[in-house]
Image (cartoon, helix red, strand yellow):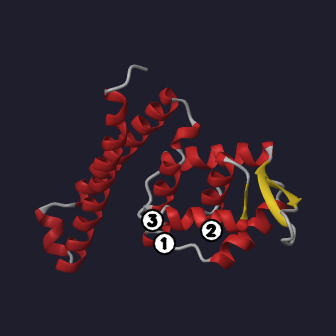
């Protein structure tokens, strides 16, 4: 699976070829810094890594009297890796919710049917995860562990509940569409 910065950058490049400056502008426009701050230096280093792995192709462009700029496009290898990484990100639960948040930005690369199927599978995974965590919480267990531990496990359930609500919100998009 790709790193979070790599997934974000490949998603932006998937939509259209971009240079590093345009990517940074897109990230600012999307207000990414409020939930996943990607430093400008990370953008540049991640682009170099993605190019070395042949996930993106850089082409030098000359615009007026400006220095050459490199515009990046997705290679077939990069597209395959990006799609596989998105699917893996949707079909897992991780307390680092940024993994799914990044994937959710780019769900439109899939057909509506695929989006609905992936989100439904995610909902099933989340509900199972919640059920398994909740099995731990019972009066006997609560008497055996610290109140901080109990509170933390219940907080973890709250986080799963939030992901369930968010996934249902995304799935609700399809209740109004005929697929």
Q: Are marks 3 and 1 in contact (CB under 8 Å)?
A: no
> Which residue carries the number 1 mark?
33
Q: Position of residue 9 (x, y in %)?
A: 65, 59
Circle nearer the N terminus (2, 3): 2
- Image point (32%, 27%), residue name: 176
Between tags 2 and 1, which lies in front? 2
> Which residue carries the number 3 mark?
96
Q: Position of residue 39 (x, y in %)?
A: 60, 77
Q: Residues within 10 Å of mark 2 (few under 14, many from 20)?
A: some
Q: Tell me the element at label 3.
A: loop
Between residues 117 and 175, which one lies in front from this camera angle?
175
Query: How far, Cα to Cα, is label 2 from label 1?
Result: 11 Å
Between tags 3 and 1, which lies in front? 1
- Image point (13%, 73%), residue name: 143
Report whether residue 13 is seen: yes
Q: Tell me the element at label 2.
A: helix
Between tags 2 and 3, which lies in front? 2
Q: Is residue 18 left or right of residue 118?
A: right
Q: Residues within 10 Å of mark 1 (few under 14, many from 20)?
A: few
> Which residue carries the number 2 mark?
24
Circle nearer the N terminus (3, 1): 1
Between residues 48 and 134, which one lies in front from this camera angle?
48
Relative to 122, residue 11 above or below: below
Q: Residues within 10 Å of mark 3 (few under 14, many from 20)?
A: few
Circle nearer the N terminus (2, 1): 2
Q: Which image quarter holds the N terminus? A: bottom right
Q: Quadrant of residue 52?
A: bottom right
């Amino acid at each position: 699976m790709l790193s979070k910065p790599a997934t974000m950058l490949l998603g932006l490049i998937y939509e259209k070829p971009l240079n590093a400056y345009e990517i940074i502008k897109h990230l600012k426009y999307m207000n990414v810094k409020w939930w996943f701050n990607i430093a400008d230096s990370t953008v540049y280093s991640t682009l170099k890594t993605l190019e070395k792995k042949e996930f993106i192709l850089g082409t030098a462009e000359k615009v007026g009297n400006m220095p050459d700029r490199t515009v990046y496009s997705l290679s077939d290898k990069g597209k395959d890796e990006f799609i596989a990484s998105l699917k893996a990100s949707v079909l897992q639960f991780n307390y680092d919710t940024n993994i799914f948040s990044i994937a959710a930005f780019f769900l439109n690369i899939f057909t509506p049917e695929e989006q609905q199927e992936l989100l439904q599978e995610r909902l099933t995974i989340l509900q199972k995860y919640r059920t398994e965590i909740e099995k731990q919480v019972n009066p006997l267990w609560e008497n055996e562990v610290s109140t901080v531990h109990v509170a933390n496990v219940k907080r973890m359930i709250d986080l799963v509940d939030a992901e369930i609500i968010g996934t249902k919100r995304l799935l609700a998009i399809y209740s109004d569409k005929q697929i």
